[in-house]
Amino acid sequence: MSETASFVDPVFLARFGLSRANVLDYFLHPLNPFRTQINTSNEVLAMQGISIGMLIQQGTTGFPLSPQAAEEEYHKALTRLTGEQYELLPPVDPSFYTQPSPLYTIRHVTRTNQRSFKILGIYYVVEGVIYKAPSVRSLMKANVARTVDGLAGASSALSVCARYLPSTGYTWHFDDNEDNVDPVALMKLHKRMKRRKILDNRKPGERNEAEEEGLRSSQAIDQILLRLAKSALVSSSAPIAAPRPTIAVAEPPSTNSSVVGDANRGK
């Protein structure tokens, strides 16, 4: 499954809406290409009548639970089982336990016991659209490809400005007038580009499969951030991003404070 693919079910969203109580049911939709084809612990709990929505309404003793307590109880029920599971991660802002959220994060794990599990994937549900989080490898490949492409373009643009004389060595000439460009340097540049085309066996600007995968992953991240930026909930309610901790740095006292301190000691 490509990391840039997505899934949305308009019928489910129109009929039930989307909340933390049913987002796992939405993810486990039979047509969702991201879900595993084997039986998961979530489906085992569903056959027992245990879900986040049911726990909110009835709890474990017949009394309703708060959304946060229901999710914690559901997570405890998952930890008592083994195999592949989908976990709903807590929201950044606790207020999203009781109000609609534009972003839900689901973690796919395989569990061997209550404390041992392996993460298989991370998925985002943004405004009802399910995306798979790109891997670190694909993001690094995209960043490296963009960097190399920019450096290659800069080197090609600067190569025509280099001049060499036996008496002075290499010098640089930057002139906006294209009529003054050295035709010999341009001819050498075209030969060099043609030689690279023959060695790479591809057209200028054509990317290989690895570069295309990196760019698609970068575009998927941009699409997720764009959906979050356009969400009315993000602009009108608490921010999604977690506040960064403030680090206090001790600064040396200024010259004026030192002078005042000396004056006070003198008094």
Image (spheres, rainbow, N blue to C red):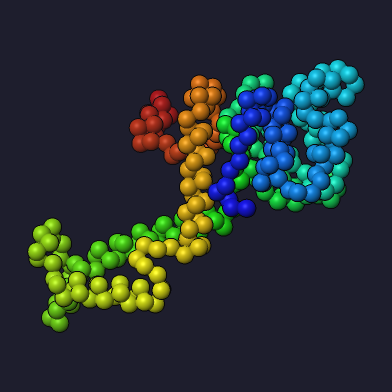
Who's the residue at 30% across and 74% down the image?
Answer: 194
Who's the residue at 13% across and 71% down the image?
Answer: 182
Q: Tell me if residue 59 comes above or below residue 245 in the rendering.
A: above
Q: Residue 83, percent across and down? A: 82, 48
Q: Is residue 35 left or right of residue 227?
A: right
**In the current view of this chain or complex, which residue is farthest to the top?**
63
Q: Residue 50, percent across and down? A: 84, 30
User: In terms of image quadrants, where is residue 157?
Assistant: bottom left
Q: Residue 172, percent across and down? A: 18, 67
Foreground pick, 123 / 158: 123
Q: Quadrant of the C terminus?
A: top left
Who's the residue at 51% across and 46% down the image?
Answer: 220
Q: Is residue 207 visible?
A: yes
Q: Is residue 82 left or right of residue 201?
A: right
**In the current view of this chain or complex, which residue is farthest to the bottom?**
166
Q: Tell me if residue 195 comes above or below residue 40 in the rendering.
A: below
Q: Is residue 266 visible?
A: no
Question: How many numbered marks, from 0 up?
Answer: 0
Foreground pick, 17 / 84: 17
**In the current view of this chain or complex, which residue is farthest to the right?**
61
Q: Is residue 113 left or right of residue 210?
A: right
Foreground pick, 260 / 215: 215
Who's the residue at 48% across and 32% down the image?
Answer: 229
Q: Residue 35, percent across and down? A: 71, 45
